[in-house]
Image (tube, rainbow, N blue to C red):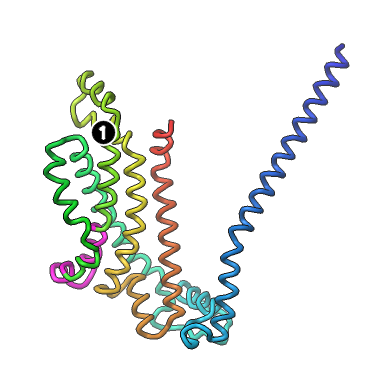
Amino acid sequence: MTATASAHTVKNTTAETAKLRGNRRSSSHSKVQSISLALIIPVIIAVVWEVAGRAGWIADGLFPPLSVCVAAFVDWVSGIGLFTSDFTPSEAYSTTWLAHVGASVGRVLMGFVLGSVLAIVFGILAGISWHAKRMIDPTINAIRPISVTGWVPIALIIFGIGDQPAVFLTALATFFPVYVNTLSGVQRVDRGLIRAGRMLGAPQYKVVMSIVLPAASPNIITGLRVSLGIAWTTVVVAEILGAKSGVGYVLIDSYNQFRFDYVIAAMATLGICGIVTDKLLQWIFADALRWSDN
C-alpha cells in the first residue's frame, strides 16, 4: 500500500511539473507572438518610410528617410554623428536635447499640477454641494468649449513671451478634463457611506478625505491621464508661438530652417515624453487604483 501510494504521489508530482512546464512554454510562446504581432506594422512603416524617403516620393524629396531622422535624433541627444551620407549635423541643435526637454517638462509639470489641483478642488466642491455646483458649473461649462489656441493671444498679451503663457495655457487645458471627471466621480460616491460617516461624527473635511476622495479616485486618475496628454499638446503650441526653448520651439525652428529630420526627431521626443510621463503617473497612483478595485 505504501509503495503504491508513493508511486501514485510521484506520478502526480511528475504530471504537475510537466503541466507547469507546458504552461510556461505556452505563456512564453504567447508573449513572443504578441510582440511579433505588435512589431509588424512599425516594421512595415519603417521600410516604406526609408524607401519612399530615399526615392524622393514624398514632398518632392524634402521628406527625409528614417535613417536620417534617427541620425538627427542621436546628434540632438548626444552629438554623435551616425554614418549616413545624407545627414549633416546641426550646430544649433547638437547636444541640446536635454536642455529643451527639461524646459518643456518644467512647463508641463507646473501647468499640470496647477490645473489639476484647482480642478480637483472645484470638482469636489461642486460634487458634494448643490449650491457650489450651481455657482461653479455654469461658468466652467461656458468657458470649456473655447479652444486652448483661442486663449493664445490673451496669454501673450497678459504674460508676454516666455514660460508664463505656456504654464497658463497648460493649466487651462489640464483643468477641464480633471474637473469633469472629478465631478462625475464624486457624484457617483455611495451617499450611504457619506451619511454613515456624518452619523459617526466625522467632520466634513474628514468625510471628503476619507470617503469621497478615495471613492472618486478612479475617475480623478482617468481625468489626470487624459489631461497629461493634452498638456503635452498644449505646451507644444505655446512653445511654437511664444518661447525660445523647449521641444515645440525646436520643432518650429527646425521647420523654418528646412531641417525636417530634426522636426521628426522633435515629434518622436514628444511621443517618448508622453509615454514616460503617463507610465509615471500610473505608477504613482497604482496603490489608489488597487484600493479602489478591492
Say which residue appears at 29% left-offset and 51% top-offset: 177
Choose between 278 and 91: the one closer to the eye: 278
- Count of labels in the image: 1
Hey, which quadrant is residue 143 in on the image?
Answer: bottom left
- Assess disc 1: are there few (<14), some (14-19) or many (≥20) residues with their C-alpha within 10 Å of its C-alpha: few
Say which residue appears at 42% left-offset and 70% top-offset: 267
Asked whether, in this view, residue 169 is left or right of residue 230, the answer is left
15 relative to 108, above or below: above
The residue stretch that appears in magenta: 154-172
Q: Position of residue 84 (x, y in %)?
A: 57, 83
112 relative to 71, above or below: above
Residue at image mark 1: 209
Quarter of the image with the C terminus in it: top left
Choose between 106 and 134: the one closer to the eye: 134
Say which residue appears at 85% left-offset and 21% top-offset: 7
Hey, which quadrant is residue 284 in on the image?
Answer: top left
Is 163 covered by the magenta stretch? Answer: yes
Choose between 12 and 98: the one closer to the eye: 12
**What element does badge 1 sit on?**
helix
Q: Main secondary structure of the magenta part?
A: helix
232 relative to 34, above or below: below
Is 232 covered by the magenta stretch? Answer: no
Asked whether, in this view, residue 288 is left or right of residue 43, the answer is left
Asked whether, in this view, residue 261 is left or right of residue 161, the answer is right
Choose between 294 and 187: the one closer to the eye: 187
Q: Position of residue 254 (x, y in %)?
A: 38, 80
